Amino acid sequence: MSDLPFGGVQIWMDGDEDSWSLYHRMARELRLAGWHVEPAADRLLVLGWSADGLTHRVQVLAAALAGRLADYDLTVFMAVTIATRLRQEGQEAGDIVAEVEARLRDDLRWPDRLQDLDGLQRTATLEPLRLRLAQVVGLETKVRRRCAEHLSLAVRVATAVAGGRVPPRARPPRVTTCLSERVVAASVPNRPPGLSPDVNPPLPDCAPSPR
């Protein structure tokens, strides 16, 4: 990997006969996160944030909140079905609960997707991109909270089916977000020429986000 002018990044792999396929798979994932990416046969260019890509991410996150993540009945049904089958197979209560939680996590998909972005910086100097990044971060916070609710529900249902002690309902941790230019930290910032990557605007005080 090497830096390009104006904050871009070039990524390449040596000695892989299937690099073209890998570059395009990487490009797809990066585009889903909101970056402007250009794959080729011998390298992958990441050229900063894409307004269209960030808009698409907002739409995908909003659709998830209104779709699968709004369907708690499906989570209960899946937890009961999986836990009942595992109990009939003679598995221990603890193993049943762990397996139900793992399968629900895979079904929701978003817990692992968002975990991959932990610690990522996301900055921009252009006002429209800053606002869109802030919107993305706000929706990701809601998705994390909703996923935690689904997994907590699945654990409680699976525990009851398996005959174990049902844990008290856990409330998702309070998340603080700050709608500033540095919404969360970016490996490929959109910076004007001449601005050092170590120079960042000061962060304003952040108020806790509403539950």
Image (cartoon, grey):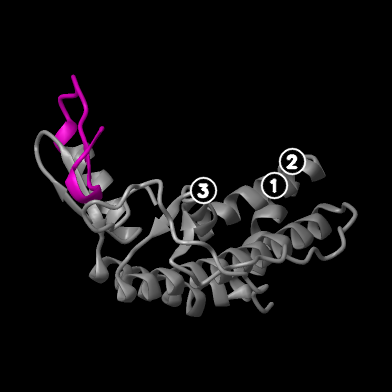
Q: CA distance from mark 3 to mark 1?
A: 37 Å
Query: At label 2, which amino acid type do we have?
Result: Asp
Q: Position of residue 86 (x, y in %)?
A: 69, 47
The residue most toward the left is 41
Could you tell me which residue is drawn at 67 percent across and 73 percent down? 208
Query: At label 3, which amino acid type do we have?
Result: Gly
Label 1: state its secondary structure.
Answer: helix
Give residue 16's quadrant in the image: top left
Q: Position of residue 209 (x, y in %)?
A: 64, 75
Could you tell me which residue is drawn at 67 percent across and 60 percent down? 151
Label 3: state its secondary structure.
Answer: loop
Give residue 200's quadrant in the image: bottom left
Quadrant where the N terminus is found in the figure: top left
Could you tell me which residue is drawn at 56 percent across and 67 percent down? 141
In magenta segment, residue 184 = no
- State yes or no: discs 2 and 1 in contact (Cβ < 8 Å): yes
- Magenta stretch, residue numbers: 1-20
In magenta segment, residue 11 = yes
- State yes or no: discs 3 and 2 in contact (Cβ < 8 Å): no
User: Few, some or many C-alpha atoms within 10 Å of disc 1 (few <14, some 14-19, many ≥20)?
Assistant: many
The residue lying toward the viewer, choosing from 172 and 149, is 172
Q: Which residue is mark 3?
A: 119
Q: Position of residue 38 (x, y in %)?
A: 15, 50
Q: Is residue 6 above or below residue 110?
A: above
Q: Which residue is mark 1?
A: 86
> Upstream in the sequence, badge 3 or badge 1?
1
> Upstream in the sequence, badge 3 or badge 2?
2
- State yes or no: discs 3 and 1 in contact (Cβ < 8 Å): no
